[in-house]
Amino acid sequence: MDTGLIHEGERLDDLQISGRYILQDPKRFCFGMDAVLLSGFVSVKPGETVIDLGTGTGILPILLEAKTKGEHFTGLEIQSESADMAQRSVSLNGRNDRISIVCGDIREASGIFGKASFNVVVSNPPYMIADHGIANPSDAKAIARHEICCKLEDLIRETKALLRPDGRCYFVHRPFRLVELLSDMHIAGIEPKRLRMVHPYKDKEPSMVLVEGKKGGRPRLSVEPPLIIYEKDGVYTKEVDEIYGF
C-alpha cells in the first residue's frame, strides 16, 4: 500500500471487507451508516455497470466493488477535494481498473457519461432542503447534507437519463421525504419496486428508508420487513453486523 497517498490530517479506515480501506478527513464530511446499509440493499448482477451519484469519498463504489460481481463502478462527485480523496482511496486499494472517480455535477451527469450508460444507479443524496439551517453554504458538510448543488428532482431526472432500459436505481433517504421521492420516481417513469424502513430500535420510528426503482417497470411495490440497527445500546443486530462484515 502506497502510504504516500495519505495526506496530512487524513485517516485510513479499515472497511473490514476483503481488505478494503478508505481515506477520510474528519474536517470534511465522513461517510455514515446510511451508505453502508445502502450497500447491503443494492443488487448488482455479474457484468453490470454501476454509477454512484454524489459519491463523496467513494464509499459506495468501493463497498459495491468488494461485495458484488459488477463489471465497473463509477463515482461522480462535485467537490474536487472529496473526488481527489476518493481517487486516492481507489488507488490505495489497487482498484483503478474496476473503479473510476469523476469530478462533476450530478445535474450534468447524462451529458458527462451519455444517456443509457449504466445498468445501476445508486445515491445517498443530501437529505435536507437547501435553506434548512445552513451556516455556510460552501462548507463541505453543508453541501453533503443539504440540497445546495443538487435537488431531488435533479437526481431523479439524471437517474432516468443514465439508466438503460429496465435498469435499476437504489436510494437511501429520510422517511419525511418518502412521498416526494416515490412520487418523483413514478412521474419520471422509474417505478418503485422495493422499500425497506430502517429503525434505530425495534420500538422506535424509522430514521431512514431504502428504495429500489426500475426504469420502465410495472407498478408493484414490495415492502420488506424493517431493518433494525441496534439490539440494545451499542450492540448492532446480527443483520447489521453482517452488512458491515463483522
Image (cartoon, rainbow, N blue to C red):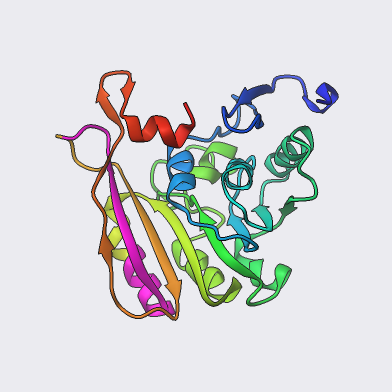
Q: Which quarter of the picture shows residue 119?
A: bottom right
| Above-or-below relation of 220 to 2 | below
Residue 198 painted magenta: yes
Q: Position of residue 10 (x, y in %)?
A: 69, 23
Q: Position of residue 199 (x, y in %)?
A: 26, 39
Residue at x-position 58% and y-position 56%: 53
Residue at x-position 62% and y-position 24%: 13
> In the rendered view, does 198 fall on the left or right side of 100?
left
| Above-or-below relation of 123 to 67 | below
Q: Position of residue 21 (x, y in %)?
A: 66, 29
Residue at x-position 64% and y-position 40%: 57
Q: Which quarter of the picture shows residue 230?
A: top left
Residue at x-position 66% and y-position 72%: 117
The residue lying furthest to the left in this view is 203
Give whichever of 44, 87 is nearer the camera.
44
Give whichever of 115, 18 is nearer the camera.
18
Q: Position of residue 126 (x, y in %)?
A: 47, 49
Q: Which quarter of the picture shows residue 221?
A: bottom left
Stretch of the chain drawn in magenta: 181-202
Count of numbered marks: 0
| Above-or-below relation of 45 to 176 | below
User: Where does the N terminus fall, quadrant-wise?
Assistant: top right
> In the rendered view, does 145 fall on the left or right side of 99?
left
Give whichever of 128, 55 is nearer the camera.
55
Residue 139 painted magenta: no
